[in-house]
Amino acid sequence: MADFLRRLLPKAKPAAESADTAPLQESRPAAAAPDSPPRSEIEQLSAAIGQSVGKQRQHNEDSLLAITSAIAGKSGSVPFGLYIVADGMGGHQFGEIASNAAIRIMAGGILRKLHPYLFGVPSQPFQESVQEILVGSVNEAHRFIQREAPGSGTTVTAALVLGEQVSIAHVGDSRAYAMYGEGRIEPITRDHSLVKRLEELGHLNEDEAANFPHRNVLIRAVGQGEAIDADVVTVPFPRPGYLLLCSDGLWGVLSDQEIYRTVSGAPTLQRACQDLVAAANAAGGPDNISVIVAQLIG
């Protein structure tokens, strides 16, 4: 299994080495996260989800998927997780269909490719890397949505965890965050939105971007345009700490520090997700809210 992971995964690198991602520092705090559990004899993933239609929407265009498993034995343990958040484009028909199709098609494609190597004995050399598998799954979802729900679209942020590495595929403005001890929270993904692009070009400062009237306008979405270009990066799983995926219904109304305080102050991951959803709704709940929080222990 260890040889398989070495073949399949590229060497994890800080996200700063990729032009399409936000910086992810390599340094780690010496202290554990505030609620880090005692060390286990085996490495294992734990994850929880939360979702709400919000306070101002009539139906839910968000979709999410969370699959967690582990293989442990004489050769060690291999935590495995697949987590996806997708936000159907508001104002387009079939937004909820697009987001749900995206998570199902991506998960199906990824699991088909990895199943023989995770849960069987590989009989021939593996031909694709994790990053190539993720890109292929995004392209498959893009073609399906264009064919079956024309005019719709969705964001996609997918995290594939193998061992101590996490590979992220990202399109749109849902986000993945790495959360560490001592209050440090860092975005792994970069928004594919008009406001983010204007900010990068220097046309908007941080305060102007926060109050930009067209914050929901995307410049890249699955199902939109002839071809799709997903950002893909592999980074170390945040330890001690958490991996968080969410739609803009969460990060758009809660600051990074509010998100960090809510997660680190919760007694369990499930409670953390519930508290995040409640906080977003208390802040007005202007959009659908979806969140996944994962932790690697052991």
Image (spheres, helix red, strand yellow):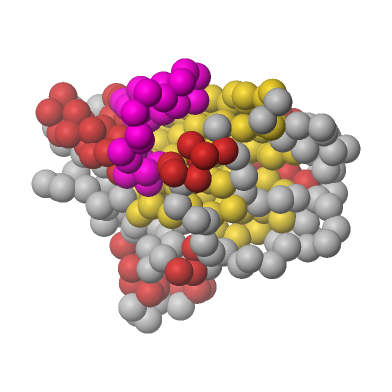
Left or right of 233? Residue 89 is: left
Q: Residue at x 69, y 32 (%)?
A: 76
The quadrant in which residue 38 appears is top right
Residue closest to the eye, 101 or 16: 16
Pinpoint residue 51: horizontal percent, then vertical percent. Answer: 55, 29
- Nearer to us in this view, 126 or 35: 126
Q: Is residue 11 visible?
A: yes
Q: Where does residue 10 sit, x and y in percent of width and height?
A: 45, 52
Which part of the image, by quadrant, shows the C terminus?
A: top right
For the magenta stretch, what is the residue range? 105-134
Please identify the residue farthest to the top as the structure is shown.
Answer: 120
Residue at x-position 33% and y-position 78%: 201
Q: Quadrant of the N terminus?
A: top right
263 within the magenta span: no
Spot occupied by residue 53 in the image (x, y as percentages of width and height)? 50, 29
Any part of residue 214 in sight: no
Q: Residue at x 50, y 32 (%)?
A: 82
- Reply above or below: 74 against 211: above
Q: Does residue 56 sit above or below 101 in this rendering? A: below
Residue 113 shown in magenta: yes
Q: Which residue is pictured at 66% across the width and 51% down the height?
A: 238
Up-down relation of residue 179 to residue 206 (above or below): above
